[in-house]
Amino acid sequence: MAQLAIASSFMPQYARLDPRVRRGVEEAFAKFAQATHAGLHLEKIAGARDPNVRTIRIDLDRRGVVLAPERGDVYCLLAVLSHDAAIDYARSRRFTVNQAIGVLEVRDQEALETLEPALREMSRDVEQRLFAHVPDKHLRQLGVDAEIVPLVRLLTSDEHLQALESLLPEPQYIALLALAQGLPVEQAWNEVAACQDERAAPAEIDPGDLVAAMRRSPDKVVFVDGPEELRDVLAHPFATWRVFLHPVQRRMALRPSYSGPAQVTGGAGTGKTVTALHRARHLAASRPGSRVLFTTFTKSLARALQQQIDLLVDDPDVRGRIDVRTVDSLAYAVVGRHRKPEIVSPDVLTVLWDDAAAGTPFSPAFLRREWEQIVLAQHLAGEAEYLACTRQGRGVPLNTAQRSVVWKAVAAVEASLRERGERTFHQLANEAADLLAGPEYDHVVVDEAQDLHTAQWRLLRRIVPDGPDDLFIVGDPHQRIYDSHVSLTSLGIGVRGRSRKLKINYRTTQEILNWAVPILGRDPAQGMDDSADTLDGYRSPMHGRRPAVRACADERAELDELVEQVRRWVDAGVEPGAIGVAARYTWLARKAVKALRDAGVPAGSVGAAAGVQVGSMHTMKGMEFRCVAVIGAMDGTVPLRDVLTPEDEDARAYLQDLQRERCLLFVACTRARDHLYVSYHGAPSTLLPAV
Ligand SMILES: Nc1ncnc2c1ncn2[C@@H]1O[C@H](COP(=O)(O)OP(=O)(O)OP(=O)(O)O)[C@@H](O)[C@H]1O
């Protein structure tokens, strides 16, 4: 019986087909399962660039494009398109085996042939060629196809290379990009090697064995065993992440074991959460009886993760052993076994710090930060411990007398909280860590790790035994939107040698990234493992429109423009629930909800109501929408003036605050899949890049 396979690029297309056509696809596929080459009405295309490509009738108007390699009884469905588009696609593409890493590659051969004379003409009088410094030997070593090399030799600028991005196979484009950026061949190789599956490239690569190459490309092709598995894959066409993992994701998620904590970093939308989901399933499924804790930051993210785990894990036993919750709810539950915890409201805490700062030379914000970053982070129990501690990370030195003044304020706030019977969540995490009698899980997977406070890490460290596969940590220091600057090393959580970075953005278009990345400024972020973290190589294969930035006369006009923009998206077929609106302040978000509702557009708070999802930028963390509007992006609001420590009070804290505001705007903007709209009234935010 023939073996069936589906190309990952087909899944989003399938999702958009109407149910009638989908049925046609399933029927055609069912025929493949029983048939042999000879028994199927597969058509060869005259003039096709690749002898292995065929088409098959799906219905009156549509054809499927199938890769049917001569060797190996395999049919891979590549696309379902209207008749003419299917013929064009089938005629133009060429499928090859990458000569360096053995993966399946596809290139638009026809477009490359069309481009060649133009490139030749443009480069005729230009002496300096982009790859003049690279010998053929290096191009070959990095897997650049011999047929493509003559074209590569014609390139004279980065722009020419970029124009080839969508026509070339990804590993070859990555190799050329790295060489064009001046990377030595060894480093360029590392970039290319990231595109290969966990099984290292075989010693011998057979250029004619497309099926072997397909098997080495699980991010591009999935093989299905029979109709049931086929139905399962096609049942969730939007959730391609369930089935197709990038080789780096796969290597990290499905590795049999790590000798200690492991870490995955990567920019927004690079599939860190997806990697964490697969790791959680892998751990629970491969170790019978084991208990896995999967933590994240906010309740709405925990709800989203629950749904994704439900989708990914079929086996009820495995599912039942994966516990998804926020770290706060974990701390609450642990303390709750001893007494009912009460959490202090933010407003009350503000008043307590205002009172405690009165009469001292310190601002409430300074004192509160000292409490959070030194006293609670180090879990200091009394004045003597505070006087003796090192205050690493704080910008302003304090002498003993000043420390005594600070401690009095801290003690006053803590005493007031005790009297009220209330705590902050960070206090609760420390208390929970103390109360734990011993580990309660076998493995812990941590999402959004960059924002966890040291006290929360202390709890997580204690809830799992120290050893192999204890902690799987996923985060992005470029999305740090709270005040935590944790050093995992200082907590005894060493990830050296067990850390990888994801670079391909699966969510946002390159145009949105080009605009949004500069928001972060130029300095590298401080990684959770204390190393400098950059976004080098961060990219998206998707393209779309550039973000729109709108200047408005005043707030009323800005809200009117928002309503108009949302209407345009809805009229274009975007579901209201796939639209996100973010504002720096909650009250502006509320006004946006009202404006939308008054205009008859369903809208509500993120994760709590149906319709357009509106919230503060903080609530956007980890979310994803087809279209995003960021409103109120003006000077004084972004960055929010009130939350910046005055530069003359503590220059270091000021820079940290400013960076946090940059990250916050970046997080909000990178929630968008297809469209990003940013508006302001008055003077624009100084953080907004030019369009
Ligand atoms: N291998 C994959 N194939 C297809 N889609 C993927 C893949 N990995 C991730 N995605 C999709 O990319 C989007 C972003 O993934 P995910 O939320 O895991 O990224 P993230 O790095 O955690 O993002 P952020 O840090 O911004 O929260 C999601 O829509 C996810 O389904």
Image (cartoon, grey):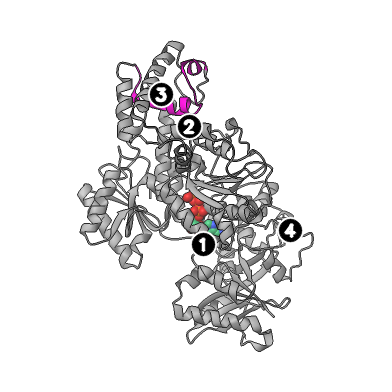
Of tags 1 and 3, the one toward the viewer is: 1
The alpha-carbon separation of the residues under discs 1 and 4 comes to: 32 Å
Dot 4 or dot 3, earlier in sequence: 4
Extent of the magenta region: 361-388
Does the magenta-highlighted stretch encompass residue 675?
no
Q: Quadrant of the N terminus?
A: bottom right
Q: Residue at x 30, y 37 (%)?
A: 636
Q: Which residue is mark 2?
A: 431
Q: How packed is label 4: few (under 14 Cα within 10 Å), some, or many (20 or more)?
A: some
Q: What is the x, y in percent for residue 309?
A: 52, 57
Q: Which mark is residue 144?
A: none
Q: How packed is label 1: few (under 14 Cα within 10 Å), some, or many (20 or more)?
A: few
Dot 2 or dot 1, earlier in sequence: 1
Of tags 2 and 4, the one toward the viewer is: 2
The alpha-carbon separation of the residues under discs 2 and 3 comes to: 30 Å
Which amino acid type corresponds to the residue marked 1 in the rendered image?
Leu
Query: Dividing the picture into quarters, in which one does residue 43 lie?
Result: bottom right
Q: Is mark 1 within 8 Å of ligand 1?
A: no
Q: Which residue is mark 1?
A: 311
Of tags 2 and 3, the one toward the viewer is: 2
- Relative to residue 145, is residue 439 drawn left or right? left
Which amino acid type corresponds to the residue marked 2 in the rendered image?
Glu
Q: Which residue is mark 4?
A: 201
Dot 2 or dot 3, earlier in sequence: 2
Q: Magenta segment, principal secondary structure?
A: helix
The alpha-carbon separation of the residues under discs 2 and 1 comes to: 35 Å
Q: What is the x, y in percent for residue 357?
A: 33, 21
Name the one closer to the observer, 172 or 160. 172
